Amino acid sequence: MAYIKRDIEDKILALSKEYSCILVTGPRQVGKTTVLKQLMDSSREYVTLDDMEERSLAKRDPAMFLQVHSTPIMIDEVQYAPELFSYIKIQIDNGAAPGTYWLTGSQAFKLMELAQESLAGRVAIFHMSSLSQHEIHGSGECKPFTLDLVALKTRESTNAPADITQIYERIWTGSMPGLVSGKFTDRDVFYASYLQTYIDRDVKEQVQLADPLLFRDFVRAAACRAGQMLNVHDIAQDVGVSDDTAKRWLQVLEKSDVIFFLRPYSNNLLKRTVKTPKMYFFDTGLVAYLTRYSSPEILANGAINGAILENYVVSELLKSYHNNVKECLLWYYRDSNCNEIDMVIESDGMLHPLEIKRSVNPSNELIGAFAHLDKASVPRGNGAILCMHPKLSAINSENFIVPIWMI
């Protein structure tokens, strides 16, 4: 089983030389512990709070916990002992050297709140997603996705080409390191176990579940609507829970980085835009498993083939920013007349519209909706159609045709 190099590694090492504490967050089983163990040297002690004795000491007497263990140290699953944060803060304020504390945790929102309260300005925070297609299939350095022509040409040389069949194979397989690396070979067993562990260890800590199977059905109902505008009532009806319960459970899925939302773009000059977000999953393999597609070929011809392709593109674009520890101002556009743009990146004072299509040879009409952004107070920049075209091309000097394998 070979180690898969992560694009975020250089950033972790660089910021570890500047900050006394780094915190790597993200969903379960995306490789947080693996990558830090790969990067750390023999002088760093490793402690996991999955060990109940270590967790008990860290919660009961955090000062003693930090005295017992030597530094530099890596503390895994630190969310189980939030009491440690204030004591780590004291050590940093007393002059702890850069890179003294490496922390990991699976509950990003909860960790963020605690870290920002106790370690504000003292910690470098990384969000690690599951593997990107560049990490799995590409080579060299991967920068955040932009519509700069020079940057696009560089991406073309560092990412691995794929046709529509291969793209849907990537979507169906998913991006979890345990599967991609070959550690686990049975995809269905892996995802079944993943869901069970997630519900038992993460969900039960956040909500009272009378019936864990009901929550599993809820995740499946949400997966059937991946890449679509959120309709809480429809999801709640599918499962037989109240709308309020569905809202709380969606918050749990978001807080634990299973799903994320794309908000609609709006400003005071765009009066007729919708307010409803679109929902996506970070891992399309989980969506394909939950929606019971038994092969990439069936998925490519199934009812959700367009929605799951959009989900894949949006999540891959976001990963390119997460892996460079950068924020991405990403929206979608839709107005009351049903004019829609799949994605809008706001960058360097410009709006960059993106349309996602399964087509190999997209038509020029697809960029027609981009003009709706001209009414906004922020000027429109280059746009693109992200599609199955085999190589980088262009419709005109302002709108590119970008293969999905290049993201």
Image (spheres, helix red, strand yellow):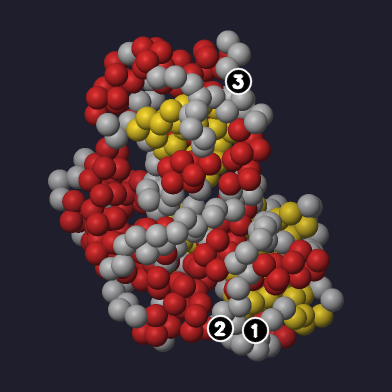
Query: The residue under label 3 is which amino acid type?
Result: Ala
Query: What is the number of callouts on the image?
Result: 3
Residue 256: % across, % down: 39, 46
Q: Quadrant of the C terminus?
A: bottom right
Q: Residue at x 32, y 31 (%)?
A: 49
Q: Nearer the viewer, residue 37 or 296?
A: 37
Q: Earlier in the sequence, mark 1 or mark 2?
A: 2
Placement of 205 over or under 283, stated as above or below: above
Q: Residue at x 69, y 81 (%)?
A: 391
The mark closer to the camera, 3 or 1, is 3
Residue 383: % across, % down: 74, 70
Contact between labelled residues 2 and 1, with CB atoms less than 8 Å apart:
yes
Q: Nearer the viewer, residue 110 or 392?
A: 392
Q: Quadrant of residue 163?
A: bottom right
Q: Earlier in the sequence, mark 3 or mark 2?
A: 3
Placement of 206 over or under 253, stated as above or below: above
Residue at numbered disc 3: 97
Q: Residue furthest right?
A: 397
Q: Nearer the viewer, residue 194 or 40?
A: 40
Query: The residue under label 2 is which amino acid type?
Result: Asp
Q: Quadrant of residue 308?
A: bottom left
Task: Specify few, some or many for label 1: CA neighbours under 10 Å numbering under 14, 14-19, or 20 or more.
Answer: some
Residue at mark 1 to residue at mark 2: CA–CA distance: 7 Å
Q: Residue at x 33, y 13 (%)?
A: 61
Residue at mark 3 to residue at mark 1: CA–CA distance: 49 Å
Where residue 390 is drawn, which disc sits there?
1
Q: Quadrant of residue 62?
A: top left
Task: Specify few, some or many for label 3: CA neighbours under 10 Å numbering under 14, 14-19, or 20 or more.
Answer: some
Residue 121: % across, % down: 62, 25
Q: Quadrant of the N terminus?
A: bottom left
Res 337 seen here: no
